[in-house]
Amino acid sequence: MPAPELRICVAETDLEAALRLDVRHGLTSHPKRLPMRLHYDGRGSAMFGELTRQPEYYQTRSERAILRDHAAAIAGALGDGPVSVVELGAGRAEKIRPVLDALAGAGRLDAFWPFDVAAGQLREVLLELADAYPGARLGGVVGDFTRDLDQLPDRGGARLVAFLGGTFGNFTGPERSRFLRDLREAVRPGDRFLLGADLVKDPEVILAAYNDAAGVTAEFNRNVLYVLNHRLDADFRPDDFEHVVLWDGDTATIDMRLRAMRAMAVDVAALALDVGFRAGEEIRTGVSVKFHRGELENQLQASGFEPEACWTDERGYMGVFLARAV
């Protein structure tokens, strides 16, 4: 097979400029906010890995169980011929592996393209995958899936676009609508979309997942301040901020925040920005929406995707939805 192709859609300078713009805008807004992607630098990604091993954090285990138990059914729902797979926000491409294995085992994995902003990690992942899937065409897309969906690879045959891990719930309502609209414009009729989503359940179960007894989520949340110190020469003292998690039952949304425990002034030197905090003032660091099955299927249908199947774990905590572009 040919060497993996790396398609560059976004440069490091673009990412840095976007970071500076988002942080400046967020820290001068009322209330203050920071983009969710700040959580996932190298340290944050390692901490998230530790978080997924906490007993309260059901999301990763539940979705993995669904994909492991239903990979053959997912592959079978894609027809009989070869399939090209694109995974958005792929990371180390661990989530999608059961589906890739099912397709490869049936001799049907035509190509796989992880899509992520981290070029170095994509290169490492593609080297690992070359040994696992010697018969498949491999490539990577270095891009932002909120902006670069028009760069989806297309080999002309059946195609599956996967978006797993519950990341869809980190979008606001308008962002979800825009993402689905952009994705529908980027795919052909007949292409499939595989979406992992966190489902509505007992709020105590949900809250515990974001406030584990070991305090891993709290440190993961405060890591955004370490990122600002490192990337933008800020002088935050992360231990002066308290991890706060709120549940809004009306919108089925987890709201994650950092609350200043004292009045302070923070210098963000790279932005020439001084940021004042009152005692008790909060920074919103992320949201996570939970979905009712019918509600999410209606959103997919309204965006030009016909829902075809939904698989859940035995407790009904997570759902993996398959839809066809029409």
Image: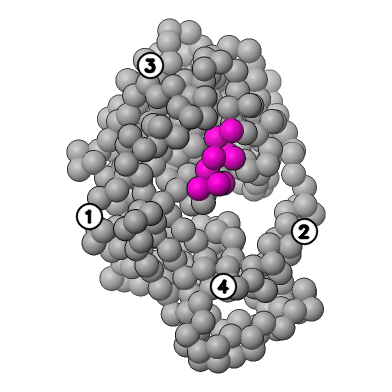
Against 284, is 309 above or below?
Answer: above
Residue where numbered disc 1 is placed: 202
Of the two numbered discs 2 and 3 on the same chain, state the one appearing first in sequence: 2
Of labels 1 and 3, the one closer to you: 1
Q: Main secondary structure of the magenta part?
A: helix
Q: Secondary structure at mark 1?
A: loop
Q: Residue at the location (43% across, 63% down)?
A: 255
Residue 230: % across, % down: 66, 72
Q: Is residue 220 above or below residue 165?
A: below
Magenta residues span 173-181
Residue for badge 2: 17
Work out which quarter of the rendered image holds the N terminus and state it: top right
Q: Dot 3 surroundings within 10 Å: few (below 14), some, or many (20 or more)?
A: few
Along the line of sight, the residue nearer the viewer: 179 or 128: 179
**Looking at the picture, how far across and down is residue 307, in whole percent?**
40, 24
Cα separation, mark 4 vs mark 2, equals: 22 Å
Precedes in sequence: disc 1 or disc 3:
3
